[in-house]
Image: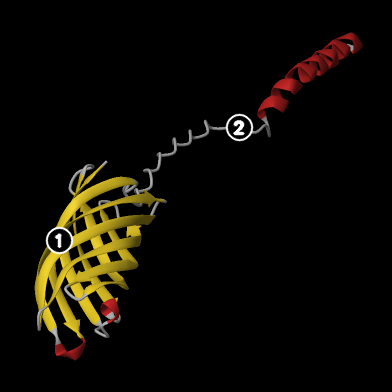
């Protein structure tokens, strides 16, 4: 009887030891993790829009417009004018800096035998690149040739240019001029010109 009890106790002990790891792995053991979601691939962002076009380079063209001159002593007159221009721009990104030389022919009669024959300008231009459009301020020195003689003066104004293609542009320009004591005669003159322009870039 004692032997039977010992066998039974030994059997229970062996079964308990064998079941221990199984129970330890099932009772109180954490459940396996569910599969983690795969993060979605980031959507590539669109490139930032271009802030401007490219206005760097030389150009040459023609202009056609109208001039109005008011001189001292009540003399005044207006007429058509036409001319040529050549220049160079450098585009810094959105800011554009340039220089230009232009020449206008005209025949503005101021009365009393006084005529304005032509005007030449040396310009400094500073503008903003809107892409295909360039808006700018301009100022510089001008030389007017009249029947009284020639005289240097200053001018300032605004302009706009538009790129039809990479090679061709059109635009407009409004300028105000001032000339004092033309050729020592004591005659002063203010002039306003408005022109439309076309140019080829190179």
Residue at figure coordinates x 38%, y 43% from the top left: 47
Helix, strand or loop at mark 1: strand
Q: Is residue 16 left or right of residue 99?
A: right
| Numbered circle sitting on residue 47 | none
Q: Against 131, is 184 above or below?
A: below
Give neighbour class at mark 1: few <14, some 14-19, many 20+ (Cα, 10 Å). some
Residue toward you, 7 or 150: 150
* Residue 64 percent coordinates (x, y): 12, 60
Q: Is residue 75 left or right of residue 124?
A: left
Q: Earlier in the sequence, mark 1 or mark 2?
A: 2
Residue 109, quarter of picture: bottom left
Q: Quadrant of the N terminus?
A: top right
Q: Against 36, is 62 above or below?
A: below
Taking the view exactly as shown, the residue that stands out farthest to the bottom is 73
Residue 140, quarter of picture: bottom left
Q: Is residue 61 left or right of residue 135?
A: left
Is residue 145 in view?
Answer: yes
Residue at figure coordinates x 80%, y 14% from the top left: 14
* Residue 95 percent coordinates (x, y): 39, 57
What residue is pinned by disc 1? 196
Give neighbour class at mark 2: few <14, some 14-19, many 20+ (Cα, 10 Å). few
What residue is pinned by disc 2? 31
Count of marks placed on residues: 2
Rounded to the nearest angstrom, the CA distance separating label 1 from label 2 is 82 Å
């Amino acid at each position: 009887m004692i032997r039977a009890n010992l066998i039974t106790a030994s059997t229970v002990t062996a079964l308990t030891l064998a079941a221990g790891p199984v129970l330890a792995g099932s009772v109180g053991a954490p459940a396996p993790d569910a599969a983690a979601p795969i993060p979605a691939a980031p959507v590539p962002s669109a490139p930032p829009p271009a802030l401007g076009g490219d206005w760097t380079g030389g150009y040459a063209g023609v202009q056609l417009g109208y001039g109005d001159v008011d001189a001292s002593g009540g003399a005044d007159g207006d007429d058509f004018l036409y001319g040529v221009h050549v220049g160079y721009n450098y585009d810094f990104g959105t800011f554009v800096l340039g220089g230009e030389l232009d020449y206008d022919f005209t025949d503005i009669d101021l009365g009393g035998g006084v005529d304005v024959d032509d005007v030449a300008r040396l310009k400094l231009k500073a503008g903003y690149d809107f892409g295909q459009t360039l808006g700018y301020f301009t100022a510089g020195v001008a030389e007017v040739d009249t029947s009284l003689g020639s005289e240097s003066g200053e001018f300032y104004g605004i302009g706009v240019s538009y790129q039809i293609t990479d090679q061709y542009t059109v635009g407009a320009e409004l300028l105000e001029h001032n000339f004092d004591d033309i050729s020592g005669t004591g005659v002063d003159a203010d002039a306003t010109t408005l022109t439309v322009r076309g140019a080829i870039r190179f």
